Image (tube, rainbow, N blue to C red):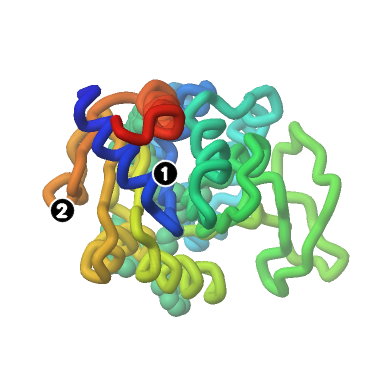
Amino acid sequence: MQREIEKVAKLVARAQMVVVLTGAGVSRESGIPTFREAQTGVWANYDPERLATPEGFLADPPLVWRWYDSRRAILADVKPNPGHYAIAEMEKIVAKVLVVTQNIDGLHAKAGSTDVIELHGNITEFHCFDAGHAADDVPFGLEAPPLCHCGSMLRPAVVWFGEALPTAAIHRSTREAQKADVVFVVGTSGLVYPAASIPYIAKDAGAALIEVNPEDTPHTDIADVFLRGPSGEILPRIIEACKSLHSDPSA
Ligand code: BJW
């Protein structure tokens, strides 16, 4: 593993531009269940298709509201972990670092990353279902969605299955991944599109692809380096290896 980490550190040290695509796994060590794990406990019997789709919301608004309320409550108490901080620290090593995250938890920005695209929105923001009017200061603990001034129900400002991702966000992510020297894919199952297409696009355009995950994913076969393990342990080791290169460029 250390040899692979040093190989990745050399790629990073030489790169002008790095894109880091992240999924729920990067926040696991902050204590946030991954998307698939979020269907455990009291929510184990619910299908994500029922909870994370516009149809599911309209079929049972209080149910979906309470699911998001419980997840937003978990987030109120969590902090970035060493994986988030290592990604933020990469900005001191590489001229341009773009974080493209599927996560809705805001932890990359909290860790200090300055250029973050949130492909699937943010769970702390809200807008109304019918007209998209933004709403602030939505309290915790409501049993059902409150109403917008226009009468429509409020919903979390996240992207559900079957909904389009923000156009500018997916276009810029794709464009930058095509320009990047190195693309990291961290803590994502690689099952949800269009985010899952980014590593393939980057690889086709010539980027070195580095995957960090405790499990194999559909991206593992095309990764130039696969680092098996938790991102909160592996990413800081890459930063340390970059620093050693800096102090000993012949290494
Ligand atoms: C660790 C770790 C540790 C654990 N360290 N790692 C092409 C082909 C097939 C299907 C489609 C396609 N294009 C579109 C589709 C349909 C659909 C889709 O992809 N379906 C698939 C399931 C088949 N996509 C969509 O519907 C998208 N919309 C769309 O394409 O619209 C088209 C359109 C155009 C114009 C008009 C209208 C429509 C929207 C997708 C939105 C996804 N939204 C969600 C919910 C967000 C809100 C919420 O959180 O509730 O986003 S779904 C869910 O999946 C969430 C996540 O961001 C996303 C990805 O999950 P992620 O991050 O990979 O998490 P997990 O839990 O799956 O995996 C965790 C990973 O971490 C695992 O690998 C672990 O091993 C690892 N791990 N511990 C590192 N310590």
- In the displayed structure image, the side of residue 100 where residue 229 appears, left or right: left
Q: Are marks 1 and 2 in contact (CB under 8 Å)?
A: no
Residue depicted at 77% across the width and 68% down the height: 133
Total label count? 2
**Residue 138 falls in image quadrant:** top right
Q: Residue furthest left?
A: 221
Q: Is residue 18 above or below residue 8?
A: below
The Cα–Cα distance between marks 1 and 2, rounded to whole angstroms, is 18 Å
**Residue 68 falls in image quadrant:** top right
The three-letter code of the residue at mark 2 reads: Ile
- Tell me if mark 1 has few (under 14), some (14-19) or many (20+) residues whose alpha carbon lies within 10 angstroms of its own: many
Return the x and y of residue 86 as percentages of the image width and height: 50, 32
- Tell me if mark 2 has few (under 14), some (14-19) or many (20+) residues whose alpha carbon lies within 10 angstroms of its own: some
Q: Is mark 1 within 8 Å of ligand 1?
A: yes
Return the x and y of residue 77 as percentages of the image width and height: 68, 23
Mark 2, residue position: 222
**Helix, strand, or loop for circle 1?**
loop
Residue depicted at 41% across the width and 51% down the height: 21
Q: Is residue 166 above or below residue 127?
A: below
Q: Quadrant of the N terminus?
A: top left
- In the displayed structure image, the side of residue 165 where residue 45 appears, left or right: left
Return the x and y of residue 28 as percentages of the image width and height: 45, 27
Mark 1, residue position: 23
Q: Is mark 2 within 8 Å of ligand 1?
A: no
Return the x and y of residue 101 as percentages of the image width and height: 49, 50
Q: Nearer the viewer, residue 102 or 111?
A: 111
- In the displayed structure image, the side of residue 138 where residue 118 appears, left or right: left
- Residue 81 appears in the picture as rendered: yes
Q: Nearer the viewer, residue 66 or 73?
A: 73
**Helix, strand, or loop for circle 2?**
helix
